[in-house]
Every structure is written in C-alpha cells, then in structure tokens.
Amino acid sequence: MTLYHFLGLGLLLFAIGAAGFVIRNNAVVLLLCIEIMLNAVNLILASFARYLYGAEGQIFIFIIMTVAAAEAAVGLGIVIALHRGHGTLAMNRIKDLKG
Amino acid sequence: MAPIFQDVNLYCLLPELVLLTGAVVLLFVRGAGRGSAALPVAATTVIVALAAVPLLWGERAVGFGGMIVKDNGALLAQALLLITALVSFAAAADALPERKNNGEYYSLLLFSLVGMGIMTAAGDLLVIFLGMEILALSLYVLVGFLKVVRAGMEGAVKYFLLGSVASAVFLLGLALTYGATGSTQLVAFTAPATMPALLPAAAVLLVVGLGFKIAAPPFHMWAPDVYEGAPISVATYISVAPKIAAFVVLLRLAGESAGPGREALTGAFVFMSVAGMAVGNLAALRQTSLVRMLAYSGIAQAAYILIGLPALSAGGAAAVSFYLLVYMFMNLGAFASLAHLSRRRTGTLRIDDLAGLASRAPGHAFALAVFMIALTGIPPTGGFFAKFYVFKAGIQAGYLGVVLVAVVATVVSCFYYLRVVMVMYGEEGGAGLRGLPAGVTMLGAAIGVMVVMTILTGILPERFLQAASAAFPLLAAGM
C-alpha cells in the first residue's frame, strides 16, 4: 500500500459524494453526500500526514470533524423546519422560488 | 519548551472579541436580547468594534503564531463589514416582526461578523476555513430566520446545501495544498513544493470554493433564491458582506501564489469572471422581480471585480479594493432602498410596481436612480471609476479579451438597470407601493449617506483609490 492508493481512495470517495449530490433528490441524502465528501478530505489529509509530513495533518482532521458536526447540527435543524413547512424533503418538489 | 502563550497576542483580535462579547450578551443576558433592547445592544457592539479599528491601524498586529495577521487590508475590510452590518440593522428594525427572540437574530449577525473578521485576517488556509464556517453557519440560520415563511426555508436549505459543498471543495483544495507543500500557510504557496503537480488543482479548488461566497459560477445558483427568500435585511447583508470578505481572501491568495499554482489561479479567475458576466447579465435581463434582478446583477458585479485579481501587478489590488468600496456603497444603497420600499409587505416587489415613484416619493426615486446609474457604471458616480480602474488594470496585464467581454456586458446591463429608472420616472400608476413611511427614518438616513458616498467616490476617485492602495501596500508593490 502506497500513498497513491490512499489518495486514490480519498478522491474516489469525494467523487462519489459529489456525484450523489448532483443525482439524488432527498435533502437528507444530500446531507449524507456532503458528509462523505468531508470524510474523503479527512482521509486524504490523514494519508499525507502518515506518508509525508507527520502529525500536523492529523490535527486538521479533528478541526474538520468538529466543524462537520456543527454543520450537520445546523443542517438537520434546517431540514426539519423545511419538512414542517413543506411536508416533503424531495428537492424537486420544493420550488416556490423561481424566475 | 517555551510557553505557547507568548505568541498568542489576543490584542490582534480586539474587534472580534468585542463582537463576540456582544453576541454572547445578546444570547445569554436576560433583558438584553429581548424585545426592543436587542437592536441598541447590537448596534453599540458594532460601533465599539468599529472604534477598535483605528486603534490597530498601521500596527500590523500578528497573533497565534502568524495565523492571524491584522494588517491594514484586513482592517479596511473589517470597517466596511461593520458599516454594512449597521445598515442591515437599520433595515432589520423595519423588516423583522416584533418578536421576543430578535436578540438571536442580532447575535447570529455578530457571530458572522466575527467569522468574516477572522477570514480577512487569516494567514493560514485552515483559519480561513474556520472563519468561513463561522460566517456560513450563522448565515444559514439567518436566511431561514422567519420560519413561518415557506420561501425562507427553501432559500435556507438551498443556501446550506450549496454552501456545504463549496466548503468541502475548499477543504479538498486545502488538503491538496497540504499534500503539495506540507503546510497550509498562505506563504507556503511561494515555497518550493514537495509535490508541485498538486498545486494547480489545489489553487483551482480553493478559488472555486471561495467563489460560492461571491456568487461566482459554478456556485452562483443560490443567490437569487436566497435573496428572495431571506428577510430583506439579511439579503442586504449577504449581498455585500461575505463578498467583501471573500475578495480580501482571494486578493491574498492571488498575491501569495507563484509558479504552476499561479497559472491555474489566473485561469480560474478568468473563467469565473467571463462565466459570471454572461450568466449574471443575461439572466438579469428577463427578471420582473426587483430583488432577483439585483441578485443577478450582484453575480455580474462580482465578475467585473474578478478581472482585477489576475492583474495584481498592474495595480489590480488597488482597483479591486476601490471597486469593493464603491460596490458596498451602491449595492448596499440599492438593497436598503428595496428594504425601505418593501417593508413588511408580503410577496416580492416587482419592477413594474415602482411606476410613478418619482412623483410620489421624489427623494426616494432619486436615490434608487443614483444607485442604478452607479451599478451601470455611468459617470459622475463611483461605479464608473470602479469599472474604469479594474478594466485599466486588466488591459495593462494583457487580458484585453476579458475586458472586451466586460464592456459588452456593461452595455447589456444598461437595459435592466436603466429600465428601473425609466419605470420610476416615465410611467404612472404603480399599484404596489401604498403606505410608504413618512418622515426621517434610520434607514432613510442610511440611504442618504450611501447616495452621498456613491457620488463622492465618483467626484474624488483618486483620493479613495490612494487610500485603498495604501491599505494593501504589500500586494501593490510586491508583485
């Protein structure tokens, strides 16, 4: 296993998250896709830290995890309020705004 | 081991600490965040923070081991951000319903100011990311603050989802920068890299992620929906403040980059600029709602400013900061006028509703006309010189093609900006504007100041340009 295996896996995960964000329709699934992307970044940071530069990169991961948790909290709150107001989480059915 | 506290230097975060104190008081002190007390407490906090800016001016306070660098550029941006917040407070006093938890609104707004202060002063990509997230998480909630408004929740969820993806893209850029150089400091961009092949990709990802904040393609789709769905005071704030903060970060990124990363960065700026001008202007042409027109116009304005970024060596830094200054006055004025006209009404304000405004509220129609003329870029307003300096820097740096696109885009933009003026002065009998507030209001006074400043920047552009370039001396000289 070399650095490039881990980098490839990380980029693949990021691409899966990004593709899912474009394809899927449910707001909660979109939240999951964002989490996949953030954790793909964590994996990339961890592999760079392990193979090249030492512990600094692994500390970044804790910071990113903290921010991701805060983001998920705010996101779930918004999604719940959205569901109360619209009665659905399907993004293609939520379109009062257009022009 | 030396104690780590020596290089913390909290003094460099003095304005942020003031804002943080105010935000916490609004949240937790009984009485401060309730009812009518919230607005004075928040406004006082912002004014005290504004008073802290001259204290730090010229000191270049460095803290947290070089992660926070409060230089004059950061302080200038901070002053603009705080003024923007004050104007949005004036709009909020009108737009928000009388509720008990208005303290939360002002508290979140102060938190977002802290985030932007950190962003503009950051010397490290990770700190920029943290500032961006403090800003973004507060704004996501503010957009959906009026939970009962369906459009508001829709705007909030769109803003949140796109914003989170943009942060993930920015983070990937950060991770690749770390992989290429072993450091996330901004100065590391100029250092010799271990894996230089990663730098171009990293630079593009960082810029695209930041592009969300200035509503530049490919992350521009949120702007019209969010501006329309959010409370008008929040839309006023979002249309100006995060853009100023993000442009300061982009200025630093562009100033620190070298080698392969620099070429990729230039390519990304040119692409985002041209795409933004095309999307913004063409979509603005067919809008009937005033706020959506202003949203697309904001996308186009950000695209004009982007021209100055690849042209830093040809005076682009001064041109960009001058444009930001003028943009703040004219866009803030336009949105404040909109807030003044649409206070507490339901539904969006259409451009046709403005018919006959000139005869019913001449002062107000004049103000809106000044802002529209400035946004088009017609002298004697500051908008003309803002565009002129940016285009001049672009031509001198060899981006003639982009500037030509921008000139064509400006001509196209005449149609939708000047249509507002023609409707106000040429037509009669708009139905939508009953019950305009009479007398002098806080918001009316703010609009008046914006009118004066928009014209003043057009009469004395050299003064303001010199002040702007003095704030970014390193960028202007070091390239």
Image: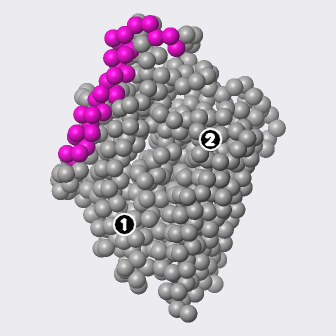
Which residue: 55% across, 40% down? B226
Tell me if residue B217 comes above or below residue B421 in the rendering.
below
The chain ID associated with circle 2 is: A
On screen, B419 above or below A45? above
Secondary structure category for the residue under label 2: loop
Front in this rendered view, residue B454 or B412: B412
- The quarter of the image holding the C terminus of chain B is bottom left
Q: Residue at x 70, y 62 (%)?
A: A69
Q: Which residue is mark 1?
A: B256
The residue nearer to you, when weighing B474 against A89, is: A89
As drawn, is A41 to the left or to the right of B373? Answer: right
Residue at x 55%, y 80% (from the top left corner): A9
* Quadrant including the N terminus of chain B: bottom right
Amino acid type for the residue under numbered disc 1: Glu
Span shown in magenta: B403-432
Q: CA distance from mark 2 to mark 1?
A: 42 Å
Left or right relative to B32: residue B126: left
Magenta stretch containing residue B415, yes or no? yes
Badge 1 sits on which subunit?
Answer: B
Q: Which mark is residue B147?
A: none
Which label sits in the foreground, 2 or 1?
Answer: 2
Query: Are circles 2 and 1 on residues that touch, CB within 8 Å?
Result: no
Q: Position of residue B419 (x, y in %)?
A: 34, 22
The residue drawn where x is 22% and y is 40% is B407
Q: In the rendering, at what x and y percent does residue B301 appear?
A: 36, 41
Q: Amino acid at mark 2?
A: Ile
The prevailing secondary structure element of the residues shown in magenta is: helix
Q: Which mark is residue A94?
A: 2
Where residue B351 sits, quadrant-wise, is top left
* Tags 2 and 1 on a common chain: no
Q: Residues within 10 Å of mark 1 (few under 14, many from 20)?
A: some
Marker count (numbered): 2
